[in-house]
């Protein structure tokens, strides 16, 4: 029994499913590219961001938004994984995983890391296309980014797992889109700098500060330009650990209580 | 091989299992017979560590499931009531995935599966997607999957649900054959009396309680064939049970 074989099996399955689901594959790439090619180009001349860290010169909007879109890919991938876990639970595959002869934390951790690795393919595919079309992609910074993407991917994936453990039915997943993904993305520094948010709205600025996604995006942004942002790294790591612990707790065995009544015939069907 | 002692479990204060005790000896097939809602799936969920009971113990090959879940499950092959195959992967990919979950290499898993695929007449289908297999073929793939890591205990939770009679009979026969050949212990949850062989041990579960247990023929003598069928609530003539030899 080798735990690496178990991780490899989970990763292989995730990669097979990702490449077989062509709609998912293309939407994962098209979504951020659409934002880059349409939204950022459209707003390029409308926003004057000035010189803000980690950039050492006035930053064009399409360069600024790059880190946010990388974060967006990982955010959507984390939520896609959570959708996939809810689907797997309905289809029974989750039972198969959770009855494998390994500790739960290992099985969930393997699934989390596997989903994060899938997101890396999406991120680098996106950066490659952006570079080909002439957007300012720091090539060396993109390589340095790899360990950071693992951290941010694990944090967002673990958040998805926490949600998946709470969502009872696949139909409820639309709520995650409306109440988790979009608020996390828009109330962050993905589209606009924190300083500009503060100048416009104190409340929105505070929301952005407590939004874990903000720190993922800032960590990605600084790492792309070789700037160490320790506070962001600490927060991302802290949130990753917190969400992972909550996810493992969410998948703990269902506890049976003490019987206070015997079953009536109508209640038997629930057992 | 499997020991369940004084197990009780309740959903929101309503008893699903009440002081259940049973044992499955090495190489024996034990049928867990009861109507829908008797608590069979709840019991299977506790045995596989998905549910945690507040009172009682489950041991597999001497390992306590609550405290040594991974070690206990290592000796266990499971076929769930609901199909758990990935429909978009091939038979070989599904088997390789499960082998990996058990810590096996992809090559090792497929090597282990090959004789079973031949025996279960699925060798030609190994590269087909599960989606295009029939219900009976899918179930056979799930049984092969449960056998990949050479388990000592096989847990089957109503594995013939939704299958036609000839397919059900072939699966029942195959499982009894492999129990005898490989000395695998089997706990077979069912509500169909005609899936039980005379030589099987029988545990009759009703309303979360074991109402009788013992060798099938002995239980039948005590309870009466027709009463047993009525309690189980499953279709299938009791004549088949009386006339069956393994």
Image: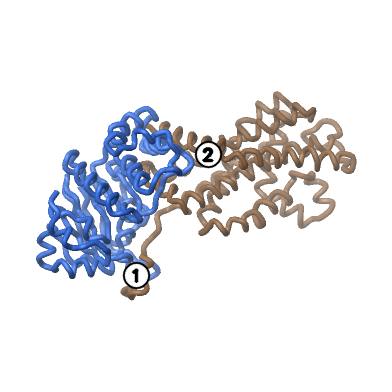
Chain colours: A brown, B blue
How many numbered tags mark residues here?
Answer: 2
Identify which residue is drawn at 61% across, 34% down. Answer: A120
Q: Which mark is residue A211?
A: none
Identify which residue is drawn at 55% across, 37% down. Answer: A20
Secondary structure found at label 2:
helix
Give the crowd class for mark 1: few <14, some 14-19, many >=20 residues within 10 Å.
Answer: many
Along the horizontal axis of the image, is A112 left or right of B110? right
Decide which of B96, A254 is in the foreground and name it. B96
Query: Dot 1 falls on which chain?
Result: A
Give the crowd class for mark 2: few <14, some 14-19, many >=20 residues within 10 Å.
Answer: some
Relative image position of residue A138 (x, y in whole percent): 74, 27
Check chain identity for marks 2 and 1: say if they share one: yes
Decide which of A182, B95 is in the foreground and name it. B95
Secondary structure found at label 1:
helix
Evaluate if marks 2 and 1 touch, with contact meaning CB atoms under 8 Å apart. no
Residue A239 in view, yes or no = no
Earlier sequence position, callout 2 versus callout 1 = 2
Decide which of B5, A212 is in the foreground and name it. B5
Along the horizontal axis of the image, is A30 left or right of B179? right
Residue A61 in view, yes or no = yes
State the separation of the CA atoms marked 2 and 1. 38 Å
Along the horizontal axis of the image, is A132 left or right of A268? right
Identify which residue is drawn at 57% across, 40% down. Answer: A21
Q: Which mark is residue A17?
A: 2
Circle 1 residue: A268
Relative image position of residue B228 (x, y in whole percent): 19, 67
Q: Is residue A270 above or below residue A59?
A: below
Relative image position of residue B67 (x, y in whole percent): 31, 49
């Amino acid at each position: 029994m080798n735990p690496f074989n178990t991780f490899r099996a989970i990763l292989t399955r995730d990669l097979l499913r990702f490449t077989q689901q062509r709609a998912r594959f293309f939407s994962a790439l098209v979504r951020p590219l659409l934002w880059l090619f349409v939204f950022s180009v459209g707003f390029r001349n409308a926003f004057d961001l000035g010189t803000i860290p980690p950039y050492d010169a006035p930053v064009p909007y399409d360069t600024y938004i790059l880190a946010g879109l990388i974060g967006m890919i990982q955010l959507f991938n984390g939520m896609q994984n959570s959708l996939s876990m809810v689907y797997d639970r309905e289809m029974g595959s989750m039972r198969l995983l959770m009855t494998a002869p390994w500790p739960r934390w290992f099985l969930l951790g393997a699934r989390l890391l596997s989903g994060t690795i899938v997101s890396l393919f999406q991120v680098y595919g996106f950066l490659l296309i952006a570079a080909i079309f002439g957007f300012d992609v720091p090539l060396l910074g993109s390589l340095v980014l790899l360990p950071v993407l693992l951290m941010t991917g694990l944090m967002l994936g673990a958040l998805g797992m926490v949600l998946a453990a709470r969502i009872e039915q696949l139909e409820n997943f639309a709520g995650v889109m409306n109440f988790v993904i979009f608020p996390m993305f828009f109330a962050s520094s993905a589209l606009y700098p924190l300083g500009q948010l503060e100048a416009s709205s104190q409340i929105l600025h505070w929301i952005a500060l407590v939004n874990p996604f903000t720190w993922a995006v800032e960590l990605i942004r600084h790492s792309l330009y070789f700037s160490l942002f320790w506070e962001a790294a600490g927060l991302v790591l802290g949130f990753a650990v917190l969400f992972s612990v909550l996810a493992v707790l969410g998948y703990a065995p269902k506890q049976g209580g003490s019987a206070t009544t015997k079953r009536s015939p109508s209640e038997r069907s629930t057992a | 091989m499997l020991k369940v002692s004084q197990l009780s479990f309740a959903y929101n204060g309503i008893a699903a299992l009440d002081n259940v005790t049973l044992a499955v000896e090495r190489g024996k097939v034990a049928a867990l017979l009861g109507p829908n809602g008797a608590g069979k799936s709840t019991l299977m969920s506790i045995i596989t560590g998905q549910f945690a009971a507040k009172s009682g113990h489950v041991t597999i090959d001497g390992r306590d499931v609550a405290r040594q879940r991974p070690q206990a499950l290592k000796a266990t092959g499971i076929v769930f009531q609901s199909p758990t195959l990935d429909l978009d992967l091939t038979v070989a990919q599904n088997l390789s995935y499960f082998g990996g979950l058990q810590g096996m290499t992809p090559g090792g898993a497929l090597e282990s599966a090959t004789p079973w695929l031949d025996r279960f007449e699925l060798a030609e289908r190994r590269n087909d997607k599960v989606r295009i297999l029939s219900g009976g073929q899918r179930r056979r793939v799930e049984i092969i999957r449960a056998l990949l890591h050479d388990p000592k205990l096989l847990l089957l939770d109503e594995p013939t649900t939704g299958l036609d009679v000839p397919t059900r009979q072939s699966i029942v026969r195959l499982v009894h054959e492999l129990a005898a050949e490989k000395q695998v212990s089997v706990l077979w949850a069912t509500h169909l009396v005609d899936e039980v062989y005379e030589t099987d041990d029988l545990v009759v579960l009703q309303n979360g309680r074991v109402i009788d247990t013992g060798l099938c023929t002995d239980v039948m003598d005590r309870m009466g064939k027709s009463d047993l069928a009525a309690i189980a609530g499953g279709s299938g003539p009791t004549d088949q049970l009386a006339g069956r030899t393994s």
